Amino acid sequence: MTLASGLALLAASACTGNLSGNSGENGAAGVATTTGGSSSGGASGGGAVPPGAGAPVDSLNCADHVVDPGPSPMRLLSRQQYLSTVKDLVGDVAGLEQALGPSDAASAFGLVQPDVTQVELEHYQAAAQAIAAAVVSEPARLDRLAPCAAGAAPTECAKSLVTKLGALAYRAPITDAADIDRHVQLFSGGAATSYAHGVELLLQGIFQSPRFLYRVEVGTGERVSEKAVKLSPYEIAARLSYALWDSPPSERLVETAATGGLNDAAGVSSQLDWMLQDPKGQKLVNRFLESWLHIGQIDRMVKSSEQYAQFQSATFKESLKGQARAFFEDLLTKQGGKLQALFQSQTVFYNRDLGDYYGVTGTDAFQSLERADGTAAGILTLPVVMAVQAKPDESSPIYRGRFVREALLCQQLPAPPANIPPAPTVTPGVSTRERAAQHEADPTCAGCHLLLDQVGFGFENYDALGRYRTEDGGKPIDASGQLVGTRDANGPFNGVQELAEKLAGSAEVKECVTRQWFRFAMARFEQPVDGCSMKSVLDDFDAAGQDLNALPRATVQTDAFLYRRPLDMEVKP
């Protein structure tokens, strides 16, 4: 079946959706306006992309747009945000991660904002009990967090704890007397036994309160348009700290909020330099890259122990992640954070575990190596990415093709049709590409798989662990493929290096990178009304020479970051 005839099957298959940029909502073009989270490696990002959310924004006219920040959901703290917040407020708590229960490995891209289930509620309760017990079991820690001088009224000491710790935990001052009294009632319930027990109950209440678990934002009464109000300076402080640090506002940031330093866009921007220079801020873009590329999924991957014995070692998996982090650090500091280098860099890193990937002998430390032989292409050939985008016993053109479509082009593909025939088993002497041939022969499969496989075949030189190879099934690798359904990258290619060249020069990919950043920084999917906010990020990214390091500053100047919609716009009839 030819590519052209296969594409004709799209309308009759499950692979529907606009992949060619026809007009969408608000005059912008729509790309793949189906639902489903940005994902890779068979793991969904969760959530749903609204119709029109994937629309191009580079041609929007935003000169006279009405300020509209889009939706402002009440965000549940991620697991990492919960842990870092507790550490900042009370210090280390032994057994806290176990009390929280197993990690669900949710994406950092704001695609998971669930209600709290009964089981999760019990985990939060256990965690709050562990936090409180850790504080009161150490007299020095208790005295540091909740001091109460001899002769002082215990309830007054409790009020002081509420106004100081509570304000930090809730990311807003607590000034209402009735609110303070409600908290002190928890203290009084245990204070009959001892001051420490009263503090313990009070801390249990604070650390399982919805005001702690969720980032609550109500905004102010100051309207900047009919669709936008200013956030309070404390709400801006929380947005900054969780976006840049994944942790709560520091004392310096709270003081800046209290003294009016976050009252306008210029004030917000002025905080960027020191926050990004902070050790927590220095890893911001690195965290984005790790989350976007699903690097952490390698810990949950299963590979054939017979074919990939080295993968069974935990240290090997750590080396795969460490190699990616070393590349990200080099990209952002020595290669200017350039988008082109993201896809076309020939610099690789190796250590003792990964030296054999490149025919060298490594040590415990990572060392860099230039690969000018066409086998290295930035993130596209990172072994951990290739391993995540593969099956337990073979490479996967499907996973790798979907990775390009969804993660790099921001095209959303629908779920596969029901009653999919089982995949062909791995057979000696038969290559992965030969086994995939049935996708093109079966009309129920051809529509989608011509979009996926023809991209994924370009990665066939890399096995299920991302090791370069020239043969598969005893036959020479055929890494030729073709891109279709893109705005500006269509055409044939041979191998990852040629694919990388297409992607690096694509305006659609450039826009997708900023779109993915928006999702990461704002902890939610974009909506059609976010077009001008995303265009602002894209324009600043371009002005900075497509330097990934410019993305944080670009984001905090957008309508989406600086404002929220009035609460009365969010009331459902």
Image (cartoon, rainbow, N blue to C red):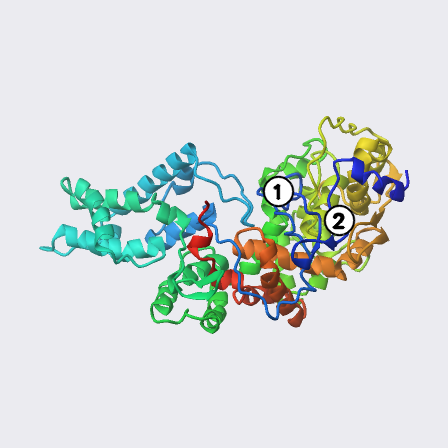
> Quarter of the image containing the C terminus?
top left
Query: Which residue is denoted by mark 1 in the rendering?
Result: 298
- Image side of residue 30 versus residue 66, left or right: right
Please name whichever residue, 34 or 288, is drawn nearer the observer in this view of the structure.
34
- Image side of residue 530 versus residue 249, left or right: right
> Quarter of the image containing the N terminus?
top right
Mark 1 lies on a secondary structure that is helix
Please name whichever residue, 516 or 223, is drawn nearer the observer in this view of the structure.
223
Q: Quadrant of residue 165?
A: bottom left
Please name whichever residue, 300 or 201, is drawn nearer the observer in this view of the structure.
201
Question: Is residue 232 among the parts visible in the rendering?
Answer: yes
Q: Residue furthest left?
A: 151
The numbered disc on residue 136 is none
The numbered disc on residue 19 is 2
Taking the spot 37% from the left edge, 67% from the top edge, the residue there is 257
Q: Residue furthest front?
A: 573
**10 Å crowding of disc 2: few (<14), some (14-19), many (20+):** some
Mark 2 lies on a secondary structure that is loop
**10 Å crowding of disc 1: few (<14), some (14-19), many (20+):** some
